[in-house]
C-alpha cells in the first residue's frame, strides 16, 4: 500500500501530526495496539495548564490554547490548580508560585476549596483558575476526523517489524503481514521512538522513557470532589486530581524504564501516597485501581520536531514528556509547517530550537 506519508504511532502525537500533515498528502497512521491512545496518551492527567513543562513547551501551550478552547467546539472544562507546601518547603513553594503564575492564598481559603487539607502540615498554598480538564478522547477523535476528512487512515494492530529505504520510498512491514510504502516516515512512536529509528537505520537521539504511576481512590471522606481543583505538592512531590467522583493521586515519580506496557510499582506508589497522606486529614484506606505510563523525554527535555539531519525523509515528532495533549495543536501545526517547507506560524526560532539537528 503506497501513500505519501506514514506516521508510526497512534497516540496524541501521531494523530495530531497526521491530521495536520493530511493537507499535504495521503497519510497512513500505523498503531501497534488494538486501539489508538493506548499507552501514555491513555494514561494522561488530562489537564491543560499553560505554565507546565519545559519553557519552549510553555510557548507551545500558549499557542495551543485557542485551538483547545474553540476548535470543533472546544475540549476544555474548568478545573483550576493549587499548590501546597509544608513549612520546610518555602524555597520550592516560592519558585513554583512564580513559575506557575499563581497567587498565594491563606490556609483557610485553601481548605474552603479542598476541605481535607491538614492545617497542621499544610503551611502555604497558591491557586489560580487558569487550568482546565481536557477531554482527551474527544481531542483525539477530532484529529482522526480531520485526518480521514483529508483521505487519510488510521490502522491499528500494525506493529512495525521492519523498515527499509527503497529508492525514494520507505518500505514498512508490520507483524500483521502487511507492507506500506511512502516518501516520508514520521516517527511519533512515543517511548519507542529510538527503537523505530534503529529499525530505519537512523541514529537514535537518546530518548529516555520515565515511568509515572497513578492510583484511583474513593472520594476522601465521602466528599463531593467534582469541583476541587487539581493540586500539586510543591516541587511536584505528588499530585491529585478529581476524576468521575473519585480522586487520582500520583507519586509524580520519574523512574527510567525500557519501552513497555507500564504498570505501577507498588513501593513507589505507597511512598507517594504516604507523602499525600501527610498533607490531608483523610487516610487512604483503599485503592480502587492503579496504573502507570511512560513519559518520554529527549536529553534536553524539550520536544523534538523536524527531519533527521542525516536522513531528511525521516521526520521526528517526539519527546512530549507528559505534555502531549497540551502542546498538540501547536506542535502538530509546527510539524506540518516544517514538513511543508513553509515559514512556521510559531516562528523560525522555535522551529530551530526543537529541530533534531541540535543533537548531531
Image (cartoon, rainbow, N blue to C red):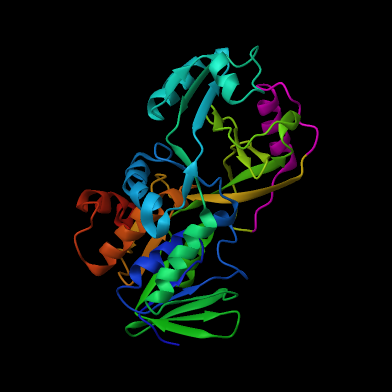
Residue most toward the bottom?
1
Q: Quadrant of residue 21?
A: bottom left
Q: Is residue 283 magenta?
A: yes
Question: Percent from the top left, x then y, of residue 286?
Answer: 80, 37
2 w.r.t. 132: above or below: below
227 w.r.t. 316: above or below: above
Q: Nearer the viewer, residue 356 or 236?
A: 236
Q: Quadrant of residue 183?
A: bottom left
Q: Quadrant of the C terminus?
A: bottom left
Q: Nearer the viewer, residue 137 or 44?
A: 137
- Could you tell me which residue is drawn at 47 percent across and 58 percent down? 139
Q: Is residue 208 magenta?
A: no
Q: Quadrant of the N terminus?
A: bottom left
Question: Percent from the top left, x then y, of residue 226?
Answer: 62, 37
- Could you tell me which residue is drawn at 54 percent across and 58 percent down? 137
146 w.r.t. 299: above or below: below
Q: Nearer the viewer, residue 343 or 81?
A: 81
- Could you tell me which residue is drawn at 64 percent across and 48 percent down? 292
Left or right: where does residue 173 sit relative to residue 285?
Answer: left
Magenta range is 261-286
Question: Percent from the top left, x then y, of residue 205?
Answer: 41, 56
Amino acid at each position: 500500500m503506497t501513500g505519501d506519508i506514514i506516521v508510526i504511532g497512534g497516540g496524541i502525537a501521531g494523530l495530531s501530526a497526521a491530521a495536520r500533515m493530511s493537507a499535504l498528502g495521503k497519510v497512513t497512521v500505523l498503531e501497534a495496539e488494538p486501539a489508538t491512545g493506548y499507552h501514555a496518551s491513555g494514561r494522561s492527567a488530562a489537564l491543560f495548564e499553560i505554565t507546565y513543562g519545559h519553557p519552549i513547551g510553555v510557548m507551545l501551550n500558549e499557542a495551543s490554547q485557542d485551538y483547545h478552547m474553540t476548535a470543533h467546539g472546544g475540549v476544555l472544562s474548568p478545573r483550576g490548580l493549587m499548590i501546597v507546601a509544608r513549612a520546610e518547603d518555602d524555597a520550592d513553594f516560592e519558585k513554583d508560585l512564580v513559575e506557575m503564575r499563581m497567587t498565594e492564598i491563606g490556609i483557610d481559603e485553601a481548605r474552603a476549596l479542598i476541605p481535607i487539607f491538614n492545617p497542621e502540615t499544610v503551611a502555604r498554598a497558591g491557586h489560580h483558575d487558569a487550568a482546565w480538564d481536557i477531554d482527551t478522547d474527544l481531542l483525539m477523535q477530532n484529529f482522526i476526523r480531520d485526518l480521514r476528512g483529508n483521505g487519510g487512515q488510521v490502522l491499528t494492530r500494525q506493529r512495525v517489524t521492519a523498515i527499509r529505504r527503497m529508492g525514494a520510498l520507505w518500505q514498512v512491514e508490520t507483524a500483521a503481514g502487511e507492507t506500506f510504502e511512502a516518501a516520508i516516515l514520521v516517527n511519533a512512536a512515543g517511548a519507542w521512538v529510538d527503537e523505530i529509528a534503529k529499525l530505519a537505520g537512523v541514529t537514535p537521539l537518546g530518548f529516555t522513557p520515565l515511568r509515572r504511576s497513578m492510583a484511583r481512590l474513593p472520594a476522601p471522606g465521602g466528599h463531593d470532589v467534582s469541583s476541587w481543583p487539581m493540586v500539586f505538592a510543591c516541587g511536584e512531590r505528588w499530585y491529585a486530581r478529581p476524576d468521575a467522583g473519585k480522586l487520582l493521586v500520583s507519586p509524580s515519580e520519574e523512574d527510567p524504564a525500557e519501552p513497555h506496557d507500564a504498570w505501577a510499582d507498588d513501593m513507589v506508589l505507597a511512598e507517594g501516597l504516604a507523602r499525600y497522606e501527610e498533607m490531608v486529614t483523610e487516610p487512604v484506606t483503599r485503592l480502587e485501581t492503579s496504573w502507570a505510563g511512560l513519559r518520554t523525554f529527549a536529553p534536553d527535555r524539550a520536544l523534538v520536531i523536524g527531519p533527521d539531519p542525516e536522513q531528511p525523509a525521516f521526520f521526528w515528532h517526539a519527546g512530549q514528556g507528559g505534555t502531549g495533549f497540551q502542546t498538540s495543536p501547536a506542535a502538530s501545526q509546527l510539524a506540518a509547517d516544517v514538513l511543508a517547507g513553509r515559514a512556521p506560524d510559531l516562528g523560525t526560532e522555535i522551529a530551530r530550537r526543537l529541530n533534531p539537528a541540535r543533537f548531531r
